[in-house]
Image (cartoon, helix red, strand yellow):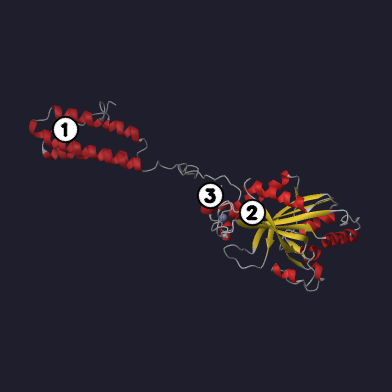
Amino acid sequence: MNEEIPQLPNYDEPALDRAFATLADEVRSETASLADIEAFRLRWLGRKQGRLKLISDAWLKSAPPEARKPLGIRFNQLKQQIEAALEAADAKPATPSTKAGLDFTLPGIVRSPGSEHPLLKTMNEIVAVFHRLGYSTALGPQVESDFYNFEALNFPPNHPARDTQDTLVLAGQQSKASRDRLLMRTHTSPVQIRTMIAEAPPIRIVVPGKVHRNDAADATHSPVFHQVEGLCVDTNITFSDLKGTLDHAMKSLFGSDVKTRFFPSFFPFTEPSADVQISCIFCGGKGCRKCKHSGWIELLGCGMVDPAVFAAVDEQRVAQGKQPAYDPAKVSGFAFGMGVERIAMILHGVSEIGQFYSGDMRFLEQFA
Ligand SMILES: [Zn+2]
């Protein structure tokens, strides 16, 4: 750094003004296109070889005593100018490279790893419990015919039980026979019928899926929701098998302390039918606001497959040229169904069903 030290002709005010104006210009032109901030800092402010140090040493050495003060003031101003330039350069991001039209200084795009939606997660957890019991997954269409959704499940046309499921029907079906008219399935149960028509017993299936009802949305209802259905048909299947299976499933989902109890109920496709309650997982059965102080939470419906369902299945099997395989004197079975949203809400303490469908990341991130 053997740069030339500018000469100072004399120490009067105009000479000092001119000399320092030249130095200030020098600093300004360097900072205008500052590439290496550190090199600039060293060049001017370096402790031993810095330009500021060298010039002030040279000029002060031969300065008359009365010129020392004005010199000192001007060197201070120059130093401040350099420091201000350094500060500004530090605050400014490095000059982007535009050579290839790319700005390498932009932060990269970080894609968060995806994770299961809480409903899918809950559905998979339920299905996994039954997979461990030897059940396999069966799926079916969401647009169903009246036959699979109602008639074969022992809901005859015009039967009042149909009123419990507000059905969304497809338009323009009037010219078809009643059983062939299409609708949005109101439950996953049609998959029971499809599976039994296709296969002879033994059957152990679990059916996760989306169902549709003409329900107004509120805190606990949605026109589209999810169910997991199960069906087991074999010889000598009894109600105690049903109780044991569901008791095990509830303990697997909610913890081994959970108790289950069964109440008589009605579903057209099972006889006898039952509603299943579990002991409240929040208060352990003592009674709290969540269980309406009863100590129990109602969770699912179930029952023994109605012989009328077996009859409808065999009738269809024969119509398709298959052997009848569901003689109620020889086989029996049970079926159950549960709402995924309801279970997810209980498991995660969610009070608004709509949050599952809102796509709000603040809600969904909590399950990642
Ligand atoms: Zn409770």
Q: Residues within 10 Å of mark 3 (few under 14, many from 20)?
A: few
Asked if the residues shown at circle 1 and circle 2 are in contact, with their CB atoms under 8 angstroms apart, the answer is no
Q: Amino acid at mark 3?
A: Gln
In this image, 113 relative to 77: left or right?
right
Q: Amino acid at mark 2?
A: Ile
Label 1 is placed on what type of residue? Leu
Residue 31 appears anywhere in the view: yes
Quadrant location of the N terminus? top left
Camera-nearest label, 1 or 2: 2
Q: Check the image and report above or below for 166 versus 103.
A: below
Instruction: Judge depth for marks 2 and 3 and give the one in front.
Output: 2
Q: Which mark sits nearer the N-terminus, 2 or 3? A: 2
Q: Nearer the viewer, mark 3 or mark 1?
A: 3
Tell me where residue 7 appears, x and y as whole percent: 18, 31
Question: Quadrant location of ligand 1?
Answer: bottom right
Can residue 341 be seen here? The reply is no
| Numbered circle sitting on residue 278 | 2
Q: Please give the residue where the numbered disc 3 appears in the rendered image.
A: 366
Q: CA distance from mark 2 to mark 3?
A: 26 Å
Separation of residues labelled 1 and 2 (CA atoms): 97 Å
When asked about the image quadrant of residue 299, the answer is bottom right
Q: Residue 295 location, x and y as percent?
A: 59, 56
Q: What is the secondary structure assignment of the residue under circle 1?
A: loop
Q: Residues within 10 Å of mark 2 (few under 14, many from 20)?
A: many
Disc 1: which residue: 8
